[in-house]
Image: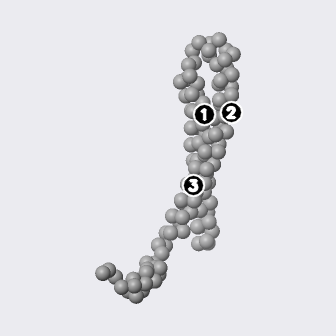
Amino acid sequence: MGIPWEMRNSLTNTRGLSLIAASPDEQRVLASKNSIQEAVKEGFKNASIAGAAAAVPTLIGCRVSPWAKANLNHTAQALIISAAAIAAFFVTADKTILGRARENSMGKNDKTA
């Protein structure tokens, strides 16, 4: 029982053709997704650099300074390092997204002129 192979093959061949028209905003949506992906990549890269840059003086300071040794436990050290990394991520991602949006809007305005 089931679907005869001739009918099944004819149905599968017609499924490859798309009769749905592309959205006029498809290019804009694609540019938006690409800018978000680029922002995440740049943000992650700068967050890892900032985390490493904040970790070295924090850990050395907690080993050398008597005040830091007495008052900054492991949780405080982790919070200091992660705050620097998180701030770097969000600042970089925000700058990247705003820069891409500016480029996209400038490109749109240049095309209409």
For the point 59% across and 72% down, which residue is it? Answer: 112
Type of the residue with mark 1: Ala
Mark closer to the chain start, 3 or 1: 3
Count the marks: how many?
3
Instruction: Pick whichever, 32 or 55, lies toward us.
Output: 55
Whole-percent x, y for residue 47 in the image = 62, 40
Looking at the rendering, which quadrant does residue 74 occupy? Answer: top right
Question: Could one spot residue 19 in this view of the protein?
Answer: no
Q: Around disc 1, counting alpha carbons within 10 Å, would you say few (fewer than 14), some (14 to 19), or many (20 or more)?
A: some
Q: Does 3 appear above or below 94? A: below
Quadrant of the image occupied by residue 70: top right
Spot occupied by residue 1 in the image (x, y as percentages of width and height): 30, 81
Tell me how the rendering is colored. Answer: one colour
Q: Residues within 10 Å of mark 2 (few under 14, many from 20)?
A: some
Looking at the rendered structure, the kind of residue marked 2 is Ala
Residue lying at the far bottom of the rendered structure: 6
Pinpoint residue 96: horizontal percent, then vertical percent: 61, 51
**Residue 53: which numbered mark, if any?**
2
Mark 2 or 1, nearer chain start: 2
Residue tagged 1 = 84
Q: Residue at x 61, y 45 (%)?
A: 44
Q: Place residue 52 in its image quadrant.
A: top right
Packing grade of label 3 (10 A; few <14, some 14-19, many >=20) is some
| Quadrant where the C terminus is found in the figure | bottom right
How far is disc 3 from disc 1 in space, using C-alphas? 22 Å
For label 1, the SS is: helix
- Asked whether the residues under the numbered discs 2 and 1 touch, taking CB atoms below 8 Å apart as contact, a structural biologist would say yes
